[in-house]
Structure formats: structure tokens, C-alpha cells
Image (cartoon, rainbow, N blue to C red):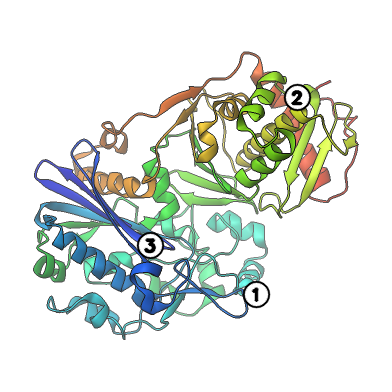
Amino acid sequence: FMCVCSFPACLIWIYILLTTHVKVIAVDEKLNVTYEESVNFDKELPEFGTQGGVHVHSDKLTVTSPVLMWVKALDIILEKMKSSGFNFSQVKALSGAGQQHGSVYWKRGACKTLKNLSPDLPLHQQLKFSFSLSDCPIWMDSSTTVECRNLEKAVKGAQNLSDITGSRAYELSNFAASLFLGSYTPIDYGDGSGMNLLNIRKKSWSQLCLDACAPELEEKLGPAVPSSSVLGPISSYHVQRYGFNSECKVIAFTGDNPASLAGMRLEEGDIAVSLGTSDTLFLWIKEPTPALEGHIFCNPVNSQEYMALLCFKNGSLMREKVRDESASGSWDEFSIALRSTEIGNCGNLGFYFDVMEITPETTGRHRFNADNQKVSNFPKEMEIRALIEGQFMAKRIHAEKLGYRIVPRTKILATGGASHNRDILQVLSDVFNAPVYTIETANSACLGCAYRAIHGVAIGENISFTDVVKLAPEPRLAAVPTAGAAQVSTSACKCQRWEMRQNLLSLKPRPLSTIPCCPS
């Protein structure tokens, strides 16, 4: 993904590399998007034979993407911009992001090739022999489970690995910035903290983790840098071939998730909730408490603080199932049910996991009445509220386990399909006891990189990230907590914490009659 942001007579350019496509946007001096372009891998690069931008191998575990497909996509998008008359000479700085948990492997000597590119040829023709692996593992790959467990074992357990690096074992790297700088580029803290190699507190590679992976790994990685770092000027290749200004600065690239946090302009204590096929939480955290569930990253906006990411598989599809079963397939009836039932659902709790959940790792539908007894079903209206309250309570509980704390200035930014339902957002507001706002995030990762790039250019002038994004469109207020909701939701969350720990994770339901916090 690439984004361009224009000040008067100057631009910031961002490049985003996602699973299915690459994207460019341009932004004017008021942070309005003025230019967009993209390349779809399957449609525009059919010679690579991908489906959804990837190759799924015969073992159904190995999932890769051709690295030259990514390089050629950059060639295509640059040529599209050139043909459209885009003025590259106005670009003052550029940055970007890539899908996290993927890795690219440069061949020894590739740096020399990058530094000596001919402006007469596209990148993909000159870099075709520059990679050790032609097919790169991406975030969908599950073939390295043994290696992940070995890494956890080497550092004395999954929790210890999480404490050091912020996550259990996954894989990641970033190479797109090198294509613009004309040299190997350092990894930023945000992207590096998704690799299970960076000590997220010391902001340096963990020797314990490095030793568990490969020899001479620190030399290959180089030092990690803050996300707002200026890496250097753009390479002469892009100056000569496309007319970039030779003083155009390359700002550190990051992962798509940290970029999204920047794009949503979260501040300390804020939370973003994406209510889609899966539900995702982005959290701004000051003091993290890494756990086996979720991920902790270095914050791309403030390198001394942190962000957390939580993903829940049972999102909109689960809500749609209960809508079909209990509201005749009607969202209007679904909303009426939410409005007609009490906050706290009279003490009735429900957990709905029709597919194996990530957070926590369990499945099934679990219902408990006000007397703390497991029951097989609820009345339709109660079922609907139990689903929505249960989903949001689970999000709050797991967020708090990672160190998130609701503060007086906390606001919730809601995105995704369900964010259009104000009654669902009202429950969200009541459970978190915080106002809920809606934002347009179709380009959140792109915009986040634009904001980071501007911040990178301005940081020498002591301009804060908050000042950079002052002109961005404000989110719209959608819901405020109902009076008295805080006491009910806090009590219910305590019950649910017990329920999830004692019953769901062990799949052995136990009565809760001895727990005084349960609503009666």
C-alpha cells in the first residue's frame, strides 16, 4: 500500500502491500484523499497463477506469494500513475506498510543490485535473481508450527516468549521500503514487534530469541528503528525513471496493523473495534501485560508506548446466524429485541462460538441463567442480547488481560458492517462505559502511513502526531453509555471472566452460585 499526501506544492506518498493487491492514495494539505490507484494480483498479474493473491500448497498448510509478483505490481502501479499525469516531483516524502507475518529473503549481493538499478528497465526484470526464495510465506501460512513451538521451548515457554516479544510465535518481515531506498532498510519497531524477535521493552533484538532461530541473524536484520524514522532519500532509480525529487525522504515502513492504528488516530485509552466477518480490537496501551491470547506491538505513533491486537473469529457470521434464528432474518427485529431487554440481560449470560474461536480457543454455545445454571436455550429476545453483550464483554475482558484500562477520556471507534446498527453500538457503549464513535476506515492503513510520513518529516520541528492529524475528519458520535450501565456491565464482566476461565477454557461448566459478583 502506498499513500501520497500533498502539502501546498508537495506530496507524501504511501505504498501498501496487502494479500490480494497493492494500493496507492494521495492526500492534500487538508488530509483529504485526492488520488487512488491499485493493482489486483489475480486480475492484473495472471501469469503468477495466484488465487486471492496466494498459492495454497498441497499440504494445505503452506501458503506463499511470489515475491516477483509484488515487485512487478509496484512497476505496474508506478506506470499507471505516470500515465495518469501524476506529478512525482511534488513528493516530499513517502512511506508504506505491508501485510504482517510474512517474510522476504534477499540473496547475498542483492544490495549491490538495488544500488545500481538502471532507470531504463522495470524493477522486476532487474531483481528476478535477487531473492533466496521465490515464493514467500505470508500470514496465512501454518506450516511452521514445529518451528514456532521450538522457539517457545527455547525461551522456556509460550508465556515467556510473549513477555519478551509481545506475542506467541508467528513470522514476519518487510522489504517494500528497500525498493524505494535502493538499499536494505531497517525494520521499524511496529513491524519488528510482530516477528517474535524484538524485545518490545528494550526496543532491541532479543539475543535469546535470535539464538533460538538462526546464526548471524542479528547481522542480517540490522538495528530496529522508530516508526517515524527517516531512512534516507529516495533512490536515483525513481528520480530518473519517474521524476521523483531527489530530496524525497523515505520514512520507515511498518505493518498493516500498526498503520491502521495510526490511520484511526487512536490516543491513549482509546479502543477501535472492527465489527466484520471476524471482530478485531486495536488498543492503545501504556503498560502492556502480554498474554498467550492476542498480540502486543510497539506503538507506531509513540514508540515508548504500545498497541494491542485481538481477533475474534465469531463476528458478523455469528450475529447473522442468531438474527436468522431469533429475529426472522430481520435486523429491525434484532434491534427491537435489544431495545426491549434490560442491560445485563437480567443476569443471563451467553457465549456463542459456532466456529473454533481464537480468543479463547473453544467452541460451542454456552448459556447460563441468573441462577448460574447452564441452560439449553433462551427466549428469542434474551438470546439476542446475550449474544451481543457476551461478544462485547469478552472483548473487554481480554483487552483488560493485556493491560488495557478504561480511563475517563476513553472513546471507542467502531468500524465494519455492524457499526451501522446503532442498537448494537449502544450495547458496546454500555459494556465499556464509554462513548462510541464511527469512522470511515476504507483507507485506514493508507491514511495511517500518510500521517506517519508527515510526522516523520515534521518530527525535526517538534510537531506532534496529534498536531499532524488535526485537519483529518472527526469521527461521528453514535452512542453514549446508558445511566447505570457501568455498574451492571462491570459486575457482569467479573462473572464472565470467571465463566470463561473456569468453564469455557476447560470445557467443564461449574456453578457460579458462590461468586458474589453475579447479578441477581
Query: How many other residues sit within 10 Å of disc 2, few (<14), some (14-19) or many (≥20)?
Result: many
Q: Horizontal placement of 83 versus 479: left or right?
A: left
Q: Is residue 86 above or below residue 107?
A: above
Q: Amino acid at mark 1?
A: Val
Q: Position of residue 399 (x, y in %)?
A: 60, 40
Q: Nearer the viewer, residue 512 or 329?
A: 329
Q: Quadrant of the N terminus?
A: bottom left
Q: Amino acid at mark 2?
A: Asn
Residue drawn at point x = 85 percent, y = 26 percent: 370
In what element is the residue under mark 3?
A: strand
In what element is the residue under mark 2?
A: helix
**Gap in angstroms between the C-alphas marked 1 and 3:** 30 Å
Task: Name the mark nearer the viewer: 1 or 2.
Answer: 2
Query: How many other residues sit within 10 Å of disc 1, few (<14), some (14-19) or many (≥20)?
Result: few
Q: Name the residue tied to disc 1.
A: 146
Do the residues under discs 1 and 2 have CB atoms within 8 angstroms? no
Decide which of tag 1 and tag 2 comes sooner along the chain.
1
Q: Amino acid at mark 3?
A: His
